[in-house]
Image (spheres, rainbow, N blue to C red):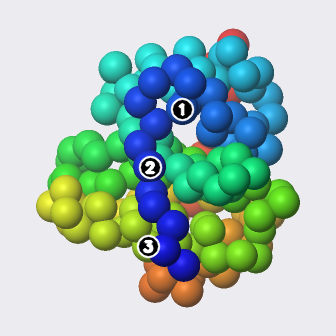
Amino acid sequence: MTTSILMAKTPETIRACFRTMGELRPHLTEEVFVAQVQRQMRQHAYKLVYIEEPVGVVAAAGYRVAEFLAWGKAFYLDDLATHSGARKKGYGGLLLDWLLEEAEREGCGQFHLDSGSQRYDAHRLYMSRHMSILAHHFVREIV
């Protein structure tokens, strides 16, 4: 597969990613998605990359590079989604491999992500890339 990884920077390319990211984040509307991605880009160095085929964006990922006391300089994958009509075709793996290489290019010592406990297909993909489950993620809603 010789597909290119593209960087979403404009409102139009961010909007094109909603087709796929909206499946992973169904609580977001297209307008909220575009505004939030732009805000995260400005305030938190969030980057959005994607793979586009003639049918549209088939896979997308959002990430950031940051420093943590616990991990040092680390690559954090916020979001990785493959459109439901394009699954099992290698797009997610292609994008994940690019992300792992990008973490290396960025000089990161670690690569991190959180994944819902019910996402078994995603876990198989991550484990095929030698990732380990090392922690529990705790959440409390603040209202």
Residue that carries the numbered disc 2 in the rendered image: 6
| Label pair 3/1, CB-CB below 8 angstroms | no
Give the residue at x 84% y 60%. 85
> Which quarter of the picture shows residue 66?
top left
Residue 112 drawn at (x, y percent): 42, 60
Residue 45 drawn at (x, y percent): 31, 32
Viewer-proximal residue among 105 and 115: 105
Give the residue at x 39% y 35%. 46
Instruction: Note whether residue 36 is visible.
Output: no
Residue 55 drawn at (x, y percent): 75, 51
Callout 1 secondary element: helix
Viewer-proximal residue among 100 and 90: 90
Residue that carries the numbered disc 3 in the rendered image: 97
Residue 76 left/right relative to 126? left
Three-letter amino acid code at disc 2? Leu
Q: Residues within 10 Å of mark 3 (few under 14, many from 20)?
A: few
Residue 50 drawn at (x, y percent): 53, 50
Residue 2 left/right relative to 138? left
Q: Which one is in front in this view, the residue at disc 3 or the one at disc 1?
A: 1
Instruction: Note whether residue 127 is visible.
Output: yes
Callout 2 secondary element: strand
Q: Is residue 134 above or below residue 80?
A: below
Viewer-proximal residue among 67 and 24: 24
